[in-house]
């Protein structure tokens, strides 16, 4: 019979404390600080909600990063944590050995637990893990007087019960607690719900915001305009799905709409830290992109403009904005460029040749003449690692030129190219044999210069089955071609 390792004194003490359902703050105030992290984790894991509530109220360290331990927590556990904060708020006297300053609900790893895990394993003594060391791992906003609750939010379609519980609790206590959200994602919620959420939080702490409105119109977006301008530390902004509004006021339709667009765009001038900007399906960008770029206060690393129509003046602004000359990622998929002069895009690629890492021109419907113009600039993009040209119209001759001119780009990782026009018959249907032959030849040519990592050639999406055929590491045919 194998011998089992007996529990340590610390484990025995924790088990005894967890069995005591009458545990109160007066007892916890006398508990050595070294016991708190391990005991709290055990209480949370075992769903000892009474103990969790008492320990939150008596927490002796400046920060309680409870979110890292609650990745699968139920509603009852969350309610116990929030009830502990309420008890903490009601206490007139807080222990001198520590005072809670930050309750961190983000479900991310936190250095606090790593420090105390080392202590439990005996890698360092409890005496070295005093309050000052824990303070070192606090976020920059923690070392102030007022209690702060930090949470990242991902609200999709409707609030789940835990989100509804937290936001209802937060709304009632926003006068006594400072609520901070660094990453906020909102998909397809009513405007009034979004406004209620934004009214709870101090907007200057938001660093990443994603608003996917799913068929909003401009009027709804304008209701959030005042909030956007307050997010002065916003680094990453994604806006998606704003469709045209029809103002039924006689001949003043265009003037009123133009005023609304300008009002919204003006908020970008207040976003001093913006580095990543993504706008998907934003109809009002046409003839307004120059205004958007002109409001940028810091160089962008990412610019994503997708699924919209741009004018020639919009495209011209890409080559005229110095804030784009350090781009690392450029995404323009599903932007029709067929009828436009691409020289401004060529100039932009030349300006970012030393920094650009990814380029997505999927479904821009560009042809050989466009590609010929871009090839010299592309060949100079020494940092380029990911490119996509799916759903464009390139002949075998010009596709070969593109591969030849980019063959020396050593950092290339993912390459996606359209099937050559020669693969299609006069009715637009793919010839599987021709497709396989030409793609295999081009990959062999490229391998004579360098070893491509992930390269693929794809046909247009089949109008009958809605799939595409792809030649890469293996041949994958659309459903129609498999029959």
Image (cartoon, helix red, strand yellow):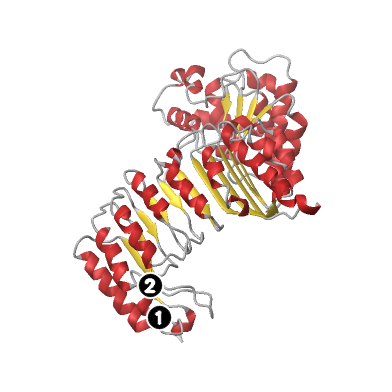
Judged from the image, the secondary structure of the residue bearing numbered disc 1 is loop
**In the rendered image, is residue 473 in sight?**
yes
Vertical placement of residue 437 versus 361, above or below:
below
Residue 479 against residue 447 in the figure, above or below: below
- Position of 46 with respect to 354 (left or right) is right
In this picture, residue 482 sits left or right of residue 178: left
Mark 1 to mark 2: distance in Å? Answer: 9 Å
Q: What element carries label 2?
A: loop
Nearer to me, 378 or 450: 378
Q: Which of 179 and 312 is in front in this view?
A: 312
Residue in front for this viewpoint, 110 or 200: 200
Vertical placement of residue 174 versus 190, above or below: above
Whether tag 1 and tag 2 are in contact, CB under 8 A, the answer is yes
Q: Where is residue 88 in the image (x, y as percent from the top left)?
A: 70, 23
At a point 51% along the width and 28% down the height, the residue shown is 9
| Residue 160 seen in render | no
Query: Is 276 situated left or right of 159 in this image?
Result: left
Q: Is residue 52 above or below residue 354?
A: above
Residue 104, disc:
none
Q: Which residue is drawn at 52% across and 37% down?
A: 296
Quickly name the residue at label 2. Answer: 419
Image spot of residue 418 (x, y percent): 39, 69
In primary-sequence order, the first of circles 1 and 2 is 2
Residue that sits furthest to the left in the current view:
448
Residue 89: percent from left, percent from top: 72, 22
In this view, which residue lies farthest toward the top?
Answer: 96
Residue at 44% across, 18% down: 128
For mark 1, what is the residue? 424
- Other-residue count near label 1 (Cα within 10 Å), few / some / many at <14 / 14–19 / ≥20: some
Dividing the picture into quadrants, the one containing residue 4 is top left
């Amino acid at each position: 019979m194998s011998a089992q390792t007996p529990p340590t004194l610390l484990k025995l003490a924790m088990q005894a404390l967890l069995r005591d359902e009458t545990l109160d703050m007066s007892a916890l105030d006398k508990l050595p600080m070294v016991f708190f992290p391990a005991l709290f984790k055990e209480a949370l894991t075992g769903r000892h909600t009474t103990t969790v509530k008492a320990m939150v109220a008596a927490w002796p360290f400046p920060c309680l990063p409870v979110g890292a331990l609650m990745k699968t927590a139920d509603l009852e556990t969350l309610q116990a944590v929030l009830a502990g904060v309420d008890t903490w708020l009601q206490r007139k006297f807080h222990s001198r050995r520590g005072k809670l300053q930050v309750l961190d609900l983000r479900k991310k790893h936190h250095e606090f637990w790593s420090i105390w895990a080392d202590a439990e394993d005996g890698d360092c003594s409890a005496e070295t893990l005093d309050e000052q060391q824990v303070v070192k791992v606090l976020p920059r906003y923690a070392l102030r007087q007022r209690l702060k609750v930090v949470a990242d939010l991902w609200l999709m379609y409707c609030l789940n019960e835990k989100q509804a519980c937290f936001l209802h609790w937060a709304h009632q206590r926003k006068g006594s607690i400072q609520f901070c959200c660094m990453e906020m994602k909102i998909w397809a919620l009513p405007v009034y719900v979004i406004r209620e959420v934004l009214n709870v939080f101090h907007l200057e702490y938001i660093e990443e915001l994603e608003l996917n409105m799913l068929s909003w119109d401009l009027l709804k977006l304008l209701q959030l305009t005042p909030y956007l301008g307050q997010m002065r530390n916003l680094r990453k902004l994604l806006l998606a799905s704003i469709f045209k509004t029809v103002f039924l006021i006689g001949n003043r339709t265009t003037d009123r709409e133009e005023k609304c667009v300008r009002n919204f765009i003006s908020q970008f001038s207040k976003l001093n830290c913006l580095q990543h900007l993504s706008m998907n399906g934003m109809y009002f960008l046409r003839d307004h992109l120059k205004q958007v770029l002109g409001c940028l206060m810091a160089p962008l690393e990412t610019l994503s403009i997708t699924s919209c129509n741009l004018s020639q003046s919009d495209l011209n602004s890409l080559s005229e904005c110095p804030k784009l000359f350090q781009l690392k990622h450029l995404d323009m998929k599903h932007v029709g460029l067929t009828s436009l002069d691409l020289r401004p895009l060529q100039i932009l690629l030349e300006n970012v040749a030393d920094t650009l890492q990814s380029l997505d021109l999927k479904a821009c419907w560009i042809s050989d003449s466009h590609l010929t113009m871009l090839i010299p600039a592309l060949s100079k993009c020494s940092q380029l690692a990911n490119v996509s040209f799916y759903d464009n119209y390139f002949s075998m001759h010009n596709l070969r030129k593109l591969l030849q001119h980019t063959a020396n780009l050593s950092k290339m990782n993912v390459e996606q190219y359209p099937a050559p026009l020669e693969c299609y018959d006069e009715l637009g249907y793919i010839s599987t044999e021709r497709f396989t032959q030409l793609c295999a030849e081009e990959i062999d040519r490229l391998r004579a210069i360098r070893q491509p990592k992930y390269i693929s050639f794809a046909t247009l999406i089949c109008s009958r089955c809605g799939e595409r055929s792809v030649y890469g590491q293996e041949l994958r045919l659309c459903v129609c071609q498999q029959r």
